[in-house]
Image: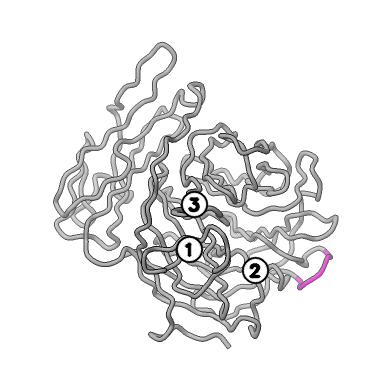
């Protein structure tokens, strides 16, 4: 039986002030930068009614200097020109913070710039206000080792109705729950090797049509199976192997604006891209290595509104690429003992922010703690690689977790502690 959250549960979400050491970002080549733009500044913290001017910089092209873009559509939280609640912005990029801190206090400046490869650019404004930036609004869990449904939750996503779909690795099941923890049923035909059955599922993701994609570890079988929104089997693709279109171990999946599927293969250190609807292989990119633009055990993938790709390696850092694999920049450098060393997955939201899940179990190297001994579970960065805040599960110990973000910015995180496993839901404040 799932237990509801009560005041006695010790899990909560807080802002954890850990030191993030500035390191010089590695720059892409001039060829990659041609046709792209950047926003400045990309992160500011303002008091109510304080002003800040933003600008768009057009990158220098061959034998041409950089320039400032003059034709920009500015919006605040996707409201053209903003409003009194979230602040206003003029046609020339002058932002004025609202008189009263909004809820949530994190405001997103969005610039729509035509004629550049990355048409949408994002900057983050944090309005200074008392209290923490997130709060936990619900939690449900089962006792570890005595659970009725979950055994080893590894990944989760949201379906078209806002329910949670969880890939349970050692449980060899894909289960659906309401956000409150009510079990709604399984995806597929149970545990096994036959089509429609799952075995050791690692990743679950949903496309724009509501179809559910599951990657599991069947022997000599396709790595990815596709199900209807109701959970009925449709087809499978991506045979096991190392040849083009094949894969060994998927640990992240994401869809671009055209529906193409990008899959991280941990073992071959590359990204496979598949055609929407059919699963036909399109291309692959990525190179094994620990140098800039190379992959060292890539574990998670996310995408922004421009179809730029974020890939986080298990040993760090997080790297940003164009859709065809050209390196742009990196951030979230491993920084022992003051910063994260191991990154398990990545999630993104509508504003291009990325959320990196990190190790937090006692006895695991690389776990981060603040001065009060609280573990950092998720590190939040904006679209430009600026560190925004940390999210923390207050548990004695937790292993690698996974998170997903809904349209309102709520964070849904699965966890396993020494005593419980389940889901916590956090809301921005």
In the rendered image of this protein, does residue 134 appear above or below residue 344? below
Is residue 98 shown in magenta? Answer: no
Are the residues tagged 1 and 3 within 8 Å (C-beta)?
no
Disc 1 to disc 2, how far (Cα)?
Answer: 32 Å
Position of residue 138 relative to residue 95, above or below, is below
For the residue pair 212 and 229, the one nearer the viewer reads as 212
| Magenta segment, prevailing SS (helix, strand or loop) | loop
- Ranked by sequence position, the earlier of labels 1 and 3 is 3
Label 2 belongs to which residue? 230
Secondary structure beneath label 3? loop
Observer-nearest of 199 and 295: 295
Image coords of residue 217 (percent x, y): 77, 60
Left or right side of 100 for 359: right
Q: Where residue 247 appears, x then y in whole percent?
A: 75, 47
Residue range highlighted in magenta:
189-194
- Residue 274 coordinates in the image, percent (x, y): 68, 44
Could you say whether the residue bearing mark 2 is in a helix, strand or loop? loop
Residue at 22 percent across and 57 percent down: it is 128
Query: Which residue corresponds to the image point at 73% horizontal and 41% vertical from the top-left?
Result: 281
253 on left or right of 196: left
Q: Secondary structure at mark 1?
A: loop
Query: Mark 1 vs mark 2: which is more N-terminal?
Result: 2
Is the residue marked by circle 2 packed among few (<14), some (14-19), or many (20+) residues within 10 Å? some
Asked if residue 55 is positioned above or below residue 214 in the image, the reply reads above
Between marks 1 and 3 in the image, the one whose residue lies nearer the viewer? 3
């Amino acid at each position: 039986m799932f237990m509801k959250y009560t005041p006695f549960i010790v899990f909560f979400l807080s802002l954890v002030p850990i030191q993030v050491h500035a390191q010089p970002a590695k720059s892409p080549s001039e060829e990659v930068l041609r046709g792209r733009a950047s926003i400045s500044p990309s992160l500011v913290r303002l008091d109510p009614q304080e002003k800040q001017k933003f600008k768009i910089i057009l990158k220098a092209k061959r034998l041409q200097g950089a320039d400032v873009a003059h034709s920009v559509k500015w919006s605040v939280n996707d409201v053209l020109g903003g409003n009194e609640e979230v602040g206003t912005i003029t046609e020339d990029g002058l932002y004025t913070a609202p008189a009263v801190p909004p809820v949530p206090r994190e405001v997103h400046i969005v610039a729509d710039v035509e004629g550049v490869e990355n048409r949408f650019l994002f900057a983050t404004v944090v309005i200074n206000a008392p209290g923490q930036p997130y709060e936990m609004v619900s939690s449900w869990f089962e006792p570890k080792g005595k659970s009725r449904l979950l055994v080893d939750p590894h990944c989760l996503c949201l379906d078209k109705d806002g329910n949670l779909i969880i890939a349970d690795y050692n449980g060899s099941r894909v289960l659906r729950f309401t956000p409150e923890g009510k079990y709604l049923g399984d995806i597929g035909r149970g545990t096994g090797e036959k089509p429609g059955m799952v075995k050791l599922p690692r990743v679950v993701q949903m496309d724009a049509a509501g179809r559910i994609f599951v990657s599991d570890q069947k022997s000599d079988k396709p790595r990815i199976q596709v199900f209807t929104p109701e959970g009925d089997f449709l087809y499978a693709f991506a045979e096991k192997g190392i040849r083009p279109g094949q894969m060994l171990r998927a640990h992240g999946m994401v869809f671009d604006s055209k529906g193409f599927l990008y899959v991280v293969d941990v073992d071959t250190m590359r990204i496979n891209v598949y055609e929407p609807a059919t699963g036909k292989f399109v291309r692959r990119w990525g190179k094994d290595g620990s140098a800039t633009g190379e992959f060292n055990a890539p574990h998670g993938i996310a995408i922004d509104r421009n179809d730029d790709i974020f890939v986080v390696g298990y040993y760090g850092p997080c790297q940003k690429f164009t859709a065809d694999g050209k390196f742009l920049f990196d951030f979230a450098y491993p920084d022992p003992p003051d910063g994260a060393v191991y990154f398990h997955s990545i999630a993104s939201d509508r504003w291009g922010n990325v959320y990196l899940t990190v190790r937090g179990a006692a006895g695991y190297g690389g776990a981060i703690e603040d001065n009060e001994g609280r573990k950092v579970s998720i590190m939040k960065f904006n679209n430009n690689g600026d560190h925004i805040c940390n999210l923390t599960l207050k548990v004695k110990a937790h292993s690698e977790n996974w998170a997903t973000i809904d349209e309102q910015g709520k964070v849904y995180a699965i966890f396993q502690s020494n005593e419980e496993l389940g889901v916590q839901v956090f809301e921005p404040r």
